[in-house]
Every structure is written in structure tokens, then in C-alpha cells.
Amino acid sequence: MRNGTVITEFILLGFPVIQGLQTPLFIAILLIYILTLTGNGLIIAIVWAVPRLQIPMYFFLCNLSFLEIWYTTTVIPKLLETFVVARTVICISCCLLQAFFHFFLGTTEFFILTIMSFDRYLAICKPLHYPTIMTSKLCLQLALSSWVVGFTTVFRQMMLLSQLPFCGNNVINHFYCDVGPILKAACIDTSILELLGVLATVLVIPGSLLFNMISYIYILFTILQIPSATGCQKTFSTCASYLTVVCLLYGAILFMYLRPTAHSSFKINKVMSVLNTILTPLLNPFIYTIRNKEVKGALRKAMTCPKTGHAK
């Protein structure tokens, strides 16, 4: 037990080195947040409205878009506050709640991306068996399992974290409540909690990444065997979108949490967190739709139909 005053709130430091840029950064991040909500919301609305898009691939994409909406909402509003007020305060309970939802949604995203890679593997490598394997019931079970496993994985650790006493320095050198800085403020030894966190990270991140890579290796070999150049290009184009998201997400997370100095380099983690929590959710709708003729066609039709009706 360390000596020190018991604290009841944390102070989010944000980005103190950007004095004078608060206003333009506030506007930029607010626009990014609005675009993220709009882009991911449009994907959900289009898939819901167009019957021919209600297939497993787009069902999982809707799950990812729904997740991204809430994932950014757990972080960006508080980040915007750090640009407006001189001292961004967050109560301990609120901080722990933010950390829980951030890691719960982040963990669930790994599972959903893994399921999406499995879905593409079946569709491309086992096309004849795909309709009988990837049924509506299985899709629902896989999506629900992702959310449940993500919740239980993080919930158990957050329950232990919520029981820790906090004292001493209450300044978190981050723009959201990351687990590393929270553990630094604990009054007791947190080595067991850190070990549990590392074990969960190793099981979830490299494990899901390995499954993704195996799926895409099989997909790549299958694509190379397609005799038609047009069919090969179309299939590769679809998978390239998924692979781009996987590389962006896993690259940032592996750098943040699985390098040797992960818990000591908070400043570097903050920079990488911008990619993970702000830019990737914004890029996802564009990455998944820019190469997808079906979604672009449905969106174009939705935008032109009201005008046609008005002209008539």
C-alpha cells in the first residue's frame, strides 16, 4: 500500500503540447466524428433497406459499423472536451466505465473481423457449400458470440480493476481512460492484473490475427487459381478491403500493447491511439464501400430516387 491521498477523480491530460491549435483540432475531430457516425450509419441503413444486400457479408459489416459508432462515441466527446476546458476531469466510476466500453468494443471488433474473414474464406474457397454452411442461424450465432465473448473477456478484468484503491497522482497522460495509466494510479501492487491483461491481449490479438492470416492465405491461393482475369480482379478487390482494415487495426494495436515498453511509453501510445480510435472507424465505411459496386449502386439509387419522384 502506497502512502498518499485517496483520489475520487482523474484528470485527462489530452494533448498539452499543441497549445494554440485547440480550435482547429476541435473542428477537425468534430467533423471526423460526424463523418464516422454518418458513414457507418449509412451502411446500416442501406443494408437494412435493400433486400439483396441482406446476406451474411453485409450482416457482419453492419455489426462492425454499429460497433464503430459506439467505439468512437466512448472516446471522442471527452477528447473534444480537452480542447475546450483547461482541466478535463472525469470521476473514477466514469473513467472505469469508459475504459470498459472502450476495451469491450475493441475486443469485440477483433472477433467480428475474424468472423468476416471466415465468411470470405467460405464464400471464395467453398462456394458450393457456402449457402448450406453460412445460414442465417449461424450468422446470428457467430455475431452474438462475438459480442458475448468480448463482453465477458473485459468485464471480469474491469471488475477487479474497479475494486482497486487509487491514491497519489490522478493525472492520466492520455485523452481517454486507458488501463495502463489507471493502474499507475493504484495504491497497491497491480502485477497480477497486468499479467491477466497481457494474457488476455495475447490470446485475443495474436490469436485472431493468426486466424485472419490463415483465412486470407487460403483466399489468396484460391484467387490465383481463378482462370478469368475479371473474376480474379473482382474477388481480390473485395478481399483487399477487408485486409486493409485488418492491417490498420492490428498494426496499431500490436504496436501499442505488445511491444516491450508498452506500459511506459504513454506519449507514443497516445499518437497510435488516434489512428486506432479516430481514423480507422472513419476509414472503415469508405474502405468497405469504395470497391463495392453493390453498396455504391444501392447508395446511388437511394440518392437519385427522391429526385426522380420529385421530377415526376
Image: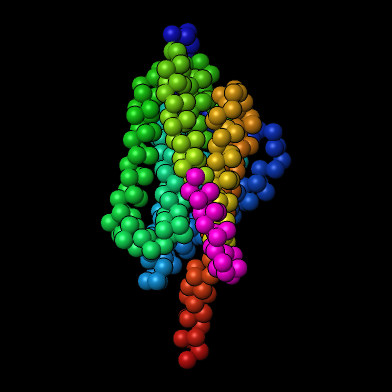
Identify the residue shown where x is 46% and y is 62%: 43
Q: Position of residue 157 (x, y in %)?
A: 38, 27
Q: Position of residue 110 (x, y in %)?
A: 46, 43
The answer to which of 86 and 60 lies nearer the viewer is 60
Q: Is residue 113 magenta?
A: no
- Please say whether residue 268 is visible from this viewpoint: yes
Name of the residue lying farthest toward the bottom: 312
Name of the residue lying farthest toward the right: 20
The residues colored magenta run 214-235
The answer to which of 129 and 160 lies nearer the viewer is 129
Q: Is residue 311 above or below residue 103?
A: below
- Quarter of the picture containing the N terminus is top left
Q: Is residue 256 above or below residue 79?
A: above
| Left or right of 279, for residue 54 | left
Identify the residue shown where x is 30% and y is 50%: 141
The answer to which of 14 and 232 lies nearer the viewer is 232
Q: Is residue 224 magenta?
A: yes
Identify the residue shown where x is 51% and y is 20%: 184
Q: Position of residue 178 (x, y in %)?
A: 50, 31
The answer to which of 198 and 162 lies nearer the viewer is 198
| Left or right of 158, for residue 267 | right
Query: What colour scheme was applied to this rendering of the protein?
Result: rainbow
Q: Position of residue 114 (x, y in %)?
A: 44, 46
